[in-house]
Image (cartoon, helix red, strand yellow):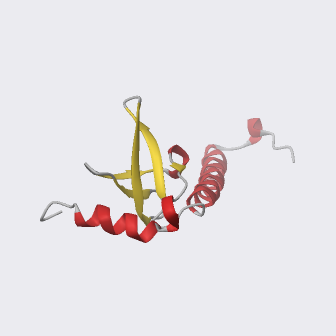
Amino acid sequence: MHIDIEKLSLEELLELNRRVVRRIDYLHSLKTRAHLDRFEPGDRISFQSDGHAVEGVVLRVNSKTLSIRTKDAHWNIHPRFVTKLPVAGGEPHRVINEIESRREPGE
């Protein structure tokens, strides 16, 4: 498909721009969904923060990010930056319950 943009009016160019942006957003959302579908609550994961590996557990799979609990904090991270770790003993829910029990009151 060839579109000669030199012949388009300002309104036509703006509409074309809106359509292109919508399409790009849609394709990005498909890629994000594919990344998110690799995870589920209870998965052990790691990610890099300030050049250091941080380990945690997926608490929730959101529409664009993973909610992750580490021993020190709660994070919302795009799944592209997260690596799934092997489950020790095959008990992901035990691990998430241990992390949940370490929460500070009021979190």
Q: Is residue 80 left or right of residue 8?
A: left
Q: Is residue 13 left or right of residue 6?
A: left
Q: Residue at position x 50%, y 63% from top?
A: 89
**Number of dots carrying numbers:** 0
Q: Residue at position x 28%, y 65% from top?
A: 100
Q: Position of residue 66 (x, y in %)?
A: 44, 58
The reply to whether residue 106 is in sight is yes
Image: 33 above or below 16:
below
Q: Position of residue 78 (x, y in %)?
A: 48, 50
The reply to whether residue 64 is in sight is no
Residue nearest the viewer, comparing 12 with 57: 57
Q: Residue at position x 41%, y 28% from top?
A: 51
The C terminus, quarter of image: bottom left
Q: Residue at position x 39%, y 52% from top?
A: 56
Q: Residue furthest top?
A: 51
Q: Position of residue 7 (x, y in %)?
A: 76, 40
Q: Position of residue 88 (x, y in %)?
A: 49, 58
Q: Is residue 93 left or right of residue 30?
A: left
